[in-house]
């Protein structure tokens, strides 16, 4: 049985205020750190996203088998958390999660003295975690060009190590702002660290319980930026976003400045209005890979030629996001091609088809990235419930903003 959502907007005019979901990136880091601090912290505005609700539940679970489902941060953060705290756990996830690599993190934890074994294919979940003896090792070299989540997982547990940790990052650093976000949250809970050149040093310390309020999610904001760019008229205020944000996806402000959206920071959040867009752009998504789908969908629809780099980590997300994007834009008469290794180009094509139906590939961001196309013509989106992973109220928020939302089940 396939659930399909039909989406359209009768006027193409967007005006109003949107309460965004809280950042699951901040929330999930705060949950792990608060647990390491002894559980007496007060976390405010925790995300409704399934990933965050799942992590909160699992941290309170006494079960020996832990199912991280399809949540990458949950799998990676809990691997480090259970290992360093000496717990006996079997950690598994969905079929796709068990295809996503974790070898870099596991090998680093094993070097530090964690007992971790693979229960299936080497380098992939499920894992058996069997305690921590400590190797006395203080300095680690870790690849940093695959996923920043490995680095963040190691950093959060680093203060618990008797000698602390010196983490030398090898290669191009992927999603650096997310590493800096982790360090900022650690500091909020009383742990100091230094990040010089490619080495992060975390001395042995003790986390202190604290009050922490989670910011609204800049990744979620990106879809509203895309809607403003495509709308006939727009004046949208997104609540709860900060100009001094730690989130890497705040980069959407500068990206969308070139794609037709002006941002005004206000005390309550950001106000978005339309401006003229450029016709040819180039972006490096190394620090904000989760924004790539939003930009691809917008440019494909707007007739904007775009060159993109820094997409390497998209291959190991909820789906192979590069392949999924290449398939879906073909339906819009547009091709996304890797012209030279690591450099992708997309040129304008035939932008209107009488019927557009987008598949989501069990990936929340595929659904939300293509939803703004409904401002130009009615569209259908398969498996719309995938948005629960990060933005459960997405379709409800669209309906409040004048979209016509109809769910069909076949």
Image (spheres, rainbow, N blue to C red):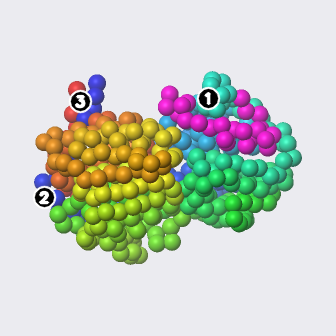
Q: Earlier in the sequence, mark 1 or mark 3?
A: 1
| Quadrant placement of the N terminus | top left
Q: Is residue 153 visible?
A: no
Disc 1 secondary structure class:
loop
Q: Give the residue at mark 2.
A: 11
Which region of the structure is painted magenta?
A: 94-117
Picture mark count: 3
Per the rendering, the mark at residue 126 is 1
Left/right placement of residue 165 relative to residue 363 reads right
Q: Identify which residue is drawn at 37% across, 39% down.
A: 324
| Quadrant placement of the C terminus | top left
- x and y, in percent, of residue 225 in the image: 32, 61
Residue 156 vertical placement versus 1 (above, below): below
Q: State the image quarter where residue 258 is shown.
A: bottom left
Q: CA distance from mark 2 to mark 3?
A: 26 Å
Q: Identify which residue is drawn at 58% across, 46% down.
A: 146
Residue 394 vertical placement versus 359 (above, below): below
Disc 2 secondary structure class:
loop
Left/right placement of residue 187 relative to residue 255 reads right
Marks 1 & 3, CB-CB < 8 Å contact: no
Q: CA distance from mark 1 to mark 3?
A: 33 Å
Per the rendering, the mark at residue 409 is 3
Dot 3 crowding, Cα within 10 Å, few <14, some 14–19, many 20+: few
Disc 3 secondary structure class:
strand
């Amino acid at each position: 049985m396939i659930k399909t959502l039909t989406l359209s907007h009768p006027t193409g005019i967007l005006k109003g205020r949107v309460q965004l979901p809280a950042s699951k990136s901040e929330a999930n880091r705060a949950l792990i750190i608060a647990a390491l601090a002894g559980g007496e912290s007060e976390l405010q505005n925790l995300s409704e996203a399934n990933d965050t609700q799942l992590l909160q539940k699992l941290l309170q679970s006494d079960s020996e088998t832990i199912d991280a489902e399809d949540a990458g941060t949950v799998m990676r953060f809990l691997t480090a958390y259970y290992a360093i705290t000496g717990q006996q756990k079997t950690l598994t996830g969905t079929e796709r999660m068990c295809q996503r690599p974790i070898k870099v993190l596991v090998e680093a934890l094993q070097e530090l003295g964690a007992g971790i074994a693979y229960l299936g294919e080497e380098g992939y979940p499920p894992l058996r975690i069997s305690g921590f003896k400590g190797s006395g090792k203080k300095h680690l070299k870790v690849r940093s060009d695959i996923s920043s989540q490995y680095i963040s997982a190691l950093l959060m547990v680093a203060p618990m190590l008797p000698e602390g940790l010196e983490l030398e990052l090898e290669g191009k650093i992927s999603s650096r702002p997310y590493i800096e976000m982790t360090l900022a949250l650690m500091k909020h809970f009383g742990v100091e660290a230094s990040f010089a050149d490619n080495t992060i040093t975390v001395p042995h310390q003790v986390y202190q319980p604290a009050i922490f309020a989670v910011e609204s999610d800049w990744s979620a904001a990106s879809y509203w930026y895309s809607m403003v760019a495509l709308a006939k008229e727009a004046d949208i205020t997104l609540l709860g976003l900060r100009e001094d944000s730690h989130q890497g996806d705040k980069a959407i402000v500068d990206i969308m400045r070139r794609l037709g959206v002006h941002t005004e920071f206000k005390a309550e959040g950001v106000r978005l209005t339309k401006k003229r867009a450029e016709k040819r752009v180039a972006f490096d998504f190394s620090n904000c890979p989760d924004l790539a789908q939003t930009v691809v969908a917008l440019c494909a629809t707007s007739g904007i030629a775009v060159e993109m780099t820094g997409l390497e980590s998209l291959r190991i997300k909820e789906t192979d996001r590069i392949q999924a994007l290449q398939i879906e834009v073909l339906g819009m008469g547009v091709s996304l091609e890797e012209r030279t290794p690591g450099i992708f180009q997309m040129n304008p094509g035939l932008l209107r088809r009488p019927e557009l139906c987008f598949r989501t590939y069990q990936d929340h961001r595929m659904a939300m990235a293509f939803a703004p196309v409904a401002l130009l013509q009615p569209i259908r989106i398969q498996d719309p419930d995938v948005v629960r992973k990060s933005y459960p109220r997405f379709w409800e928020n669209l309906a409040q903003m004048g979209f016509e939302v109809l769910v069909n089940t076949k």
